[in-house]
Image (cartoon, rainbow, N blue to C red):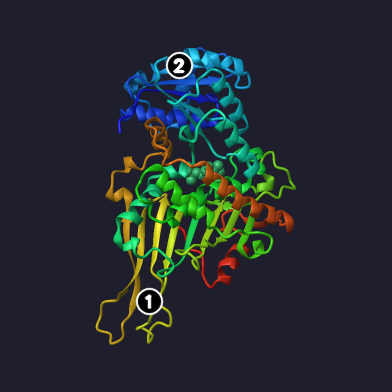
Amino acid sequence: STIPACDIVIFGAKGDLARRKLLPSLYQLEKAGALHRETRIIGVGRADWDIKTYTKVVRLALETFMNDDIDDQVWKTLSTRFDFCNLDVNETNYFSRLGVKLDQQARVTVNYFAMPPTTFGAICKGLGAAGLNSKPSRVVMEKPLGTDLTSSNRINDQVAEYFTESQVYRIDHYLGKETVLNLLALRFANALFTSNWDNRTIDHVQITVAEAVGIEGRWGYFDQTGQMRDMIQSHLLQILTMIAMSPPSDFTTDRIRDEKVKVLRSLRPINYSNVHDTTVRGQYTSGYVHGKLVPGYLEEEGANKNSRTETFVSIRVDIDNWRWVGVPFYLRTGKRLPNKCSEVVVYFKQPALNLFQDSYQQLPQNKLTIRLQPDEGMDIQILNKVPGLDHKHRLQTTKLNLSFTNTFNQEHLADSYKRLLLETMRGIQALFVRCDEVEEAWKWVDSIIAAWKAVNDVPQPYQAGTWGPRASVAMITRDGRSWNKCH
Ligand code: BG6
């Protein structure tokens, strides 16, 4: 669909998100010719900047956070789009200043809240007071939406006072990743997988989102949040719903989100009775990552030495519905692991009868590995006869391997913010998280966090550069399985 002319309003113009992600993405969209001729970009903040100063700030952000050189022609066009509005979001009356800046024709306004969620209520109130909340106006919000169900509901209610759900775009940037989106094509365009995607054929699923980085100067934020709220509540549960959802009746926004929310509602609750057996929390100590000695979590700058915040979580998730009962989903995510690697591995059951018993007590399982990042692609592990004249079948596991970069143009593996920004301009919400999805995710996560508290759980130490605490290995070993080795 065509992209209409928009006023893109960035609240938090000075902030990290705007400078690191949004402005570089807007530059890339300009370069790709994806912005409407009349689209404008309006920074909002407390700074006393004029257009010239703001333009300089943008230029500097692009120079700092983009890998490519800035193309003069692209910059020339982009820089004509800027405007700046001096505004303290707590001063409701001042929002009329923004009204003056916006085009009076009823064009699309994309209000991007690149600020802490505690300010969302005030921003909505201000927009409402200035009459800037009517239909063509949209709001885009970043995670984390609150820190638990109560605070998240509060934010959603505050926003809902001024905007209807059809105007609200909740970002989970994993939904903008090419490989995450490809899960829909893989699952619903290929009969091979549509017919083999349930507890009759699949043994279990593993979802890993591993990072080599640590806290990167965000200790204050991270310590209040932890890996459970920062990663599981959002990204890992979103990947899980994409893997586990039933086919939607069509690809329209709400049909997709209906199916995703059904999965979240079917998650077996984890509470103090089963938390010990199904979850592991870890916290990294110093160690070597990529050959470099890095400090432990409690030794990072600004650290509270007594913190019990987790930097690693693994969980056995059960989905109690017809399709998945009996198929555990093992989730694992952490900071300071050996390398950056996000993947989904689907393990298939062994054939009903082993005809190769002479040579193999147990046949290795077929395994579909979906590499979300880096080295995007997928492979399938299958068994083959080793060529030769042996009387007995000698088998060997081999791989059918698809690499996205070799098959498709690398350009297309674009940063997800580019895609998500475009979708907000197009007005398509399918890749954004609906209110009830957020609610269900928090309900399930809150119960685990409450259970950890109730049993006074202390995170287990793991050395930086390893795959988490030993207890994480023990958890999956108890089920007779083992973690996939990420490369
Ligand atoms: C963010 C988290 O949402 O996702 C960060 O807040 C994390 O802690 C990041 O590092 C990971 O995103 P990506 O795209 O680099 O996998």
State the residue in front, 309 or 234: 234
Discs 1/2, front:
2
- Secondary element at tag 2: loop
Q: Is residue 282 left or right of residue 290?
A: right
* CA neighbours of label 2 inside 10 A, class few (<14), some (14 to 19), many (20+): many
- Badge 2 is on which residue? 102
Ligand 1 within 8 Å, label 1 CB: no
Q: Is residue 115 above or below residue 181?
A: above
CA gap, disc 1 and disc 2: 64 Å
Find residue 127 and report its horizontal and vertical position in percent: 54, 22
For the N terminus, the image quarter is top left
Q: Is residue 318 left or right of residue 310?
A: left
Q: Which mark is residue 460?
A: none
Residue located at (30% from left, 58% from top): 190
Q: Is residue 439 above or below residue 44?
A: below
- Badge 1 is on which residue? 351
Q: Is residue 154 above or below residue 211?
A: above
Could you tell me the amino acid type at mark 2? Leu
Ligand 1 within 8 Å, label 2 CB: no
